[in-house]
Amino acid sequence: MCVSLSGGLSCQGQLNFIRFLQTVCISVNRVTDDPSNDFFFEAYDRENIAYGMQPSPELAAYLKQTGAKASTYTQRPKAIDLGAGAGRDTLALAAAGYDVTSVDVSERGLDRIRERAERTDLSERIQTVVCDVRELSMEANQYAAVIATTVLDHIPGTDAPAVWKKMCASLTDHGMLYAQVHTTEDPGSNQSPGKESDQPVSETAGAVINYFRPNQLVGWACDPDSKLRVLRYEERLEWDTTHGAPHQHGKAVLLAVRHGFHPEWFGQPAAFPRPEQD
């Protein structure tokens, strides 16, 4: 059953409640059930929900190729989707066999996750939590999948490294980490080359406050302290037609696993996959 935690309890009270439910141990802060305090309320309140239903392509490829295989896990693995929004990656993780905790500061976005989970019979695998990722407590060696799709760029640059370290430390020995950030190539960036771009800017560009420099994200991943092995990294321009008028983004996309873990990953798209069986 989807569980939503918001106002009414102190941070410690909500933490104890989650422990009581025998779920993940987190602290909860910054509730945004008031639309005036929710930057993304209107985007998630639409009939055609912003950002659509399709999961992030690299994540979808990884889940299709690896899933949550019984040979790797003795019980259903845990995943956490930071900045889950309306749940396009959350639902893909749950469908692949993970128990997912979806974290966001937007109560409306989490409402839509619960609605979508109910429609797809995935409610038992998804828990939603209203929380600022900077206030989130993530225990070490807890998650088989940590997802941060455009999260590290929505918090100040001075705070992002600490969140990154929590993400990496929380991975299990068979853990996968997926991160996506806006880069200085984005037309909404106040830095070059993005600020010189004449391409259209996203309607929600105001939420991005930390545009990543070239190679910054992969540099974090390659730091020995992160204990990651990079499967795929790309910096690219992309057109977004999932909300508002068509607009362009500059993105950095990272798919990595815990160092020493070697899942059956054939690339995205798969370069030389296993031949189909008749």
Image (spheres, grey):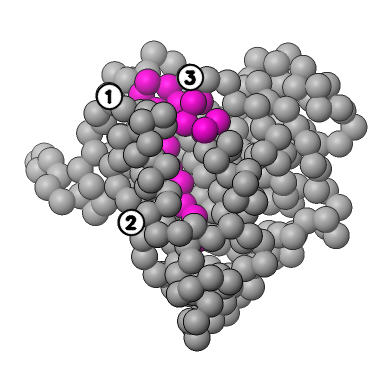
Residue plotted at (65% across, 39% down): 133
Depth check: give the residue in front, 108 or 114: 108
Sequence-wise first label, 1 or 3: 3
In the image, residue 116 lies at what x, y percent? 61, 47
In the rendered image, the vertical position of residue 71 relative to residue 276, given as above or below: above
| Residue displayed at 81% across by 22% down | 12
Task: Compare residues 44 and 214 and report the one nearer the observer.
Answer: 214
Q: Position of residue 202 (x, y in %)?
A: 58, 73
> In this figure, which residue is indicated by the disc labeled 3?
141
Q: Please give the range of residues in magenta.
A: 165-182
Q: The N terminus lies in which quarter of the figure?
A: top right
Most frequent secondary structure within the magenta stretch: strand
Q: Amino acid at mark 2?
A: Glu
Residue count near mark 3 (Cα–Cα under 10 Å), binned few <14, some 14–19, many ≥20: some
What separation in Å lies between label 2 and label 1 (alpha carbons)? Answer: 22 Å
Q: Is residue 193 left or right of residue 101?
A: left
Q: Secondary structure at mark 3?
A: loop
The structure residue drawn at horizontal position 37% and vertical position 54%, both measured from the top left corner, is 215
**Total labels drawn:** 3
Circle 2 residue = 234
Rendered residue at 62%/46% (across/down): 158
Task: Report if residue 84 is visible in the image.
Answer: no
* Sequence-first disc among 3 and 2: 3
